[in-house]
Image (cartoon, grey):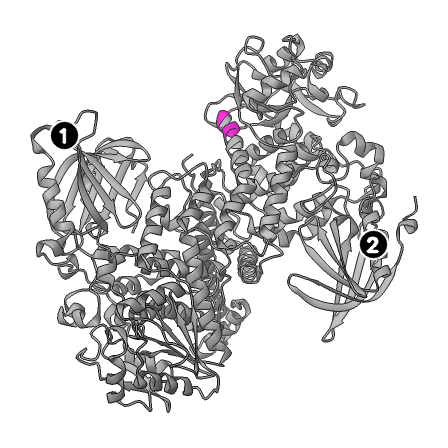
Amino acid sequence: MEFAELIKTTKVDNVVFSHPGLEPVAGTLCITSHHLLLSGSREQNQIELWLLIRNVDAIEKRLANSSCSLTLKCKDLKVLHLEIPGMEECLNVASSIEALSSVESVMMMYPFFYRPQSMRLAGGGRQPHALEKYYQQVASRTGAWRLSVVNEDFQACPSYPALVVVPSSVDDAALRKSARFRQGGRFPVLSYYHKKNGTVMLRSSQPLVGPHRKRCPEDEGLLAAALDGRSRGFVLDTRSAQAAKQAKMMGGGTEHRSAYAGWKRMHRALDRGRPLQESFVKVVETCNDPSLTMDRWLSKLEASKWLTHVKESLGTACLAAQCMEREEACVLVHGAEGMDTTLLVTALAQVILDPCRRTMAGFQELLEQEWIQAGHPFHLRCARSAYSHARLKQESPVFLLFLDCVWQLGRQFPLSLEFNEAFLLALFEHSYASPYGTFLCNNEKERKLCNVEGKTHSLWPWIHSERQKFLNPLFAPNPLVIWPSVEPQSIFLWQGLFLRWVRSSHYIDEAWTEIQKIARNHKAHLEHQSGAASTQTEAQTLSKVETNAHL
Amino acid sequence: MESSSIKKPLKDGPNWEHNEEVPRLPGETRVTDKEVIYMCPFNGPVKGRVYITNYRLYLRSVESDTVVILDVPLGAISRIEKMGGASSRGENSYGLDITCKDMRNLRFALKQEGHSRRDIFELLTKYAFPQSHNLPFFAFLNEEKFPENGWLVYNPMVEYRRQGLPNDQWRVTFLNEHHALCDTYPSLLVVPYNTTDDDLKKVSAFRSRGRIPVLSWIHPENQAVITRCSQPLVGMSGKRNKDDEKYLEVIRDTNGQLSKLTIYDARPNVNAVANKATGGGYESEDAYPNAELLFLDIHNIHVMRESLKKLKDIVYPHVEESHWLSSLESTHWLEHIKLVLTGAIQIADKVSSGKSSVLVHCSDGWDRTAQLTSLSMLMLDSYYRTILGFEVLVQKEWISFGHKFSSRIGHGDKNHADADRSPIFLQFIDCVWQMSKQFPTAFEFNEQFLITILDHLYSCRFGTFLYNCDSVREKEKLSEKTLSLWSLINSTKAKYVNPFYTKELNRALYPVASMRHLELWVNYYIRWNPRIRQQQPNPVEQRYLELLALRDDYMRRLEELQITNNPRLSNSSSSSSSSSQMMSHVQTHF
């Protein structure tokens, strides 16, 4: 396939473009294989707008007389208006964008073509896995866990990475058997080791119990080994008891108490898949509808159920965290496939429990480990965003829901996260459309096939180069567990995301820039001053940490 | 004023009980105390001892694992009821039910035998409702001393001079000095230069309760003004009054523009029409051809009272879980906030456009009118966004112009169901909070400042909000016999400063009044619920303050270093200039 075949027109003059916050500007539109470039000038100011075509979620045409207007609705929720002279030109532009934005092949996507001068491809030099690094930390504290290469060829589980952490006492043959007893081969693996008391969180997919109550001794042995002598563990099923029961008829199911001694089951129903996508569509629709006046805004917002999803997700993550922190028990989290709500819960629980996961570097490792390598199918889930008219396939904003939950944590604990809202927004944008390869494909196996590591740039070096922009200037490391309040009154709409293109955040941004400046000055001063006095002041400042809410 | 808090036991637990006295203000005297069980809606029954003084109700738990403390000014109590009878069955079913004005209720259970609650009920009722028992407000007994005198904050003459008044179009009149013209207006009024005192008297006959149009604020550049009044006495027959018509014409003329005078009637159109039946009404087009009348659709005090009541129902003691947003919507509280803000924005926009002056009224001109004039002034004039300026604004537009605080709040009055009660001032403070959310750098004061004002709106510790109008306040010698709330606030100002504040002159603020940008003020309305996260003081503010303090500290040290390192600079004048240079480097500009 050649991109040129898809581009019906490469350049149109006298296009008027605008978006909320940008007054209409007349200029030229160019279409390249991956970008729309709009350039124009107003009052001697050159205005240039680059739009990644992959970012276009829906395109709406309005024809009137000789001119025609296009509305481009983007995956990052931005809405762009173009007025194009000439009907034919306009239809050409529209169909080019449509064709280019729906190219399915991963290898044709922009990250494979993005070659900035300032960056060099990783090439052969393989970066150490986030998981390997994490395993080193665990291994330094306990010998109960080992790094297994059972999945080196992605045979045992196609959606797992090559390396997994499992109980030391379980050998690879048993792992393979356990994999066969779990949907998609996702056998229980270590997700998190709680340093404070040595409890662990595991994740997997549902066991293939089926209507005849099948059992698998190796799987049972694996979970028994995970308890490592402790008497109690909780299986946190992210489906309702009803749904879990129904899954049995389809060959799935959940762990039977009699088969898994010491493990107790809990159910917390979390929506995913289509209901979640529909909720996302509705909340965005509600936020963008200017006709919604006072009497219907709140009920519409409630009807979208987005905030309910946020609340339920946080609540479930708290429950998992509570099991470990307060009950001193191990936890196994799974739903059905174990790659959506399961990851949402395990990742969130870690942010709540572990201060290391709240730093920039720690959070990045968490994303690598619990989302990207853990096989959250980004390619399928983030193919379309909230505007698309295309028939939904597997789209679902689980990752966005996770980011929203983290934002809520940041709102309730404004000093405890090292990163800020802009960072979460950037992650949201890049998970849907990005020049970087980080969120490409559905799992490690696919990424290896496409050689994503060798042929695309990673998002992280860029994040690092823009680090200042993404830091929370008020960050003060908080060694405590941050228990969020999950009352509905404590859960807020993420205005920075959903109203980003509707409201002007000018004054709030100004305030943050100023705080950033002051904080940076403070740091510079500290660095200049050596001596006991200054370190003491800092220690004092840092010792004030946020307190816990009542759960 | 943190009144209910659950604290971890102190380390020196055993001694604690002996060491800590019940907090008492100078002038506060002990009335009684009693063993009770506090039926805490969040933590279940708590055994404790309740202490009643002439100012507060104070409860301390006696069990030692967690210490529960309850500290409620008696002024915050709106209703005390007996619950259960001597023969009631069931645990803790006999006792007292107390309804408060600040969004909470308290319930105490007592021992059933021996009429144990009779004394405490009677004493509590007596001191909580002093006005119904011929007792003075605590404000008259309060013997606190403050370095600042809050009564000096507002001097109308100084405030009008700040606005550049009098000038060639507007003059100051003392016509109302003895409140003869209008008993609910202050003694000093600003009126058009070309209108004589006799004319004013004639106009007052045509305005409800004599509340004639007078100036509230003048735009420093375009001379457009905000004036306020009550409704004209048009009645069913459609009466007219030549003096009133002429008077509005004069007001229209003062800013030298040819456009019409814009009259904002705060009421919904239908209500304005209905008011004709009781002798009121609005300015008709025939009688006032040079005026444009607009209705702002804000509902009356009864609607607001019911709305707040519904809000309380869904937030206390237990917050509505399952349909939180739609039940919040059904209270219409935010909707009313939106309408008030929208009205104020229209007024501010009209005045700053310079095309026309505005006149604002509702029925009596002391509720909705006060909300609208004060909010639009807050949007237009950055002075009112400072701590001092805001105090002036409240003193001027609310207190001196006769918002009926006594009737609306019911200070010391046992009549809890009085139809005059309404949370109009609370609604105004809520609007201010909404603005401060949208413009985090524009206000010198923080959330704590607003909450403190609301707490003392009820507490009766200060004279500031007592009585309905200046004429009564003068008669009661309020400023001699009581303290002002501003004395407390201005003496401990640091607590109320918004660290993000940056002084910026003459910028008009237009908040977005769209529903999706309004939030429920959780830190106020749901502050008693320990399950809702709220950190006081706000950690972000706290951290920022620390950083600012550190910065100042470094600057000081740097200065010292410069002095010691460079002997030539050690004389004071040059060292201060060098430090100010450095300062400008790190100075905040936003």
Q: CA distance from mark 2 to mark 1?
A: 83 Å
The numbered mark 2 sits on a residue in which chain? Answer: A
Q: Which mark is residue B111?
A: 1
* A1 is higher (above) or lower (below) than A449: below
Q: Secondary structure at mark 2?
A: loop
In reply to whether residue A15 is colored magenta, the answer given is no
Magenta stretch, main secondary structure, is helix
Q: Residue A191: percent from the left, percent from the top?
A: 62, 27
Q: Residues within 10 Å of mark 1 (few under 14, many from 20)?
A: some
Horizontally, residue B120 falls left or right of residue A420, namely: left
Mark seen at residue A61? none
* Front position among marks 2 and 1: 1
Can residue B503 be seen by looking at this rendering? no
Residue B454 at x, y percent in the picture: 31, 56
**Residue A117, which numbered label?**
2
Q: Secondary structure at mark 1?
A: loop
Residue type, label 2: Gln
Does the CB distance between marks 2 and 1 fall below 8 Å? no
**x, y (%) of residue B66?**
29, 33
- Residue drawn where x is 26% and y is 31% of the image: B45
Q: In the rendered image of this protein, does residue A30 appear above or below residue A399?
A: below
The front one of B326 and A39 is B326
Q: Residue at x 53, y 48 (%)?
A: A475
- Label 1 amino acid? Lys
Q: Residue at x 65, y 51 (%)?
A: A467
Report the magenta residues as a range.
Answer: A319-323
- Residue B431 sits in which quadrant? bottom left
Residue A114 appears at what percent x and percent y? 82, 49
Q: Mark yes or no: residue A252 visible.
A: yes
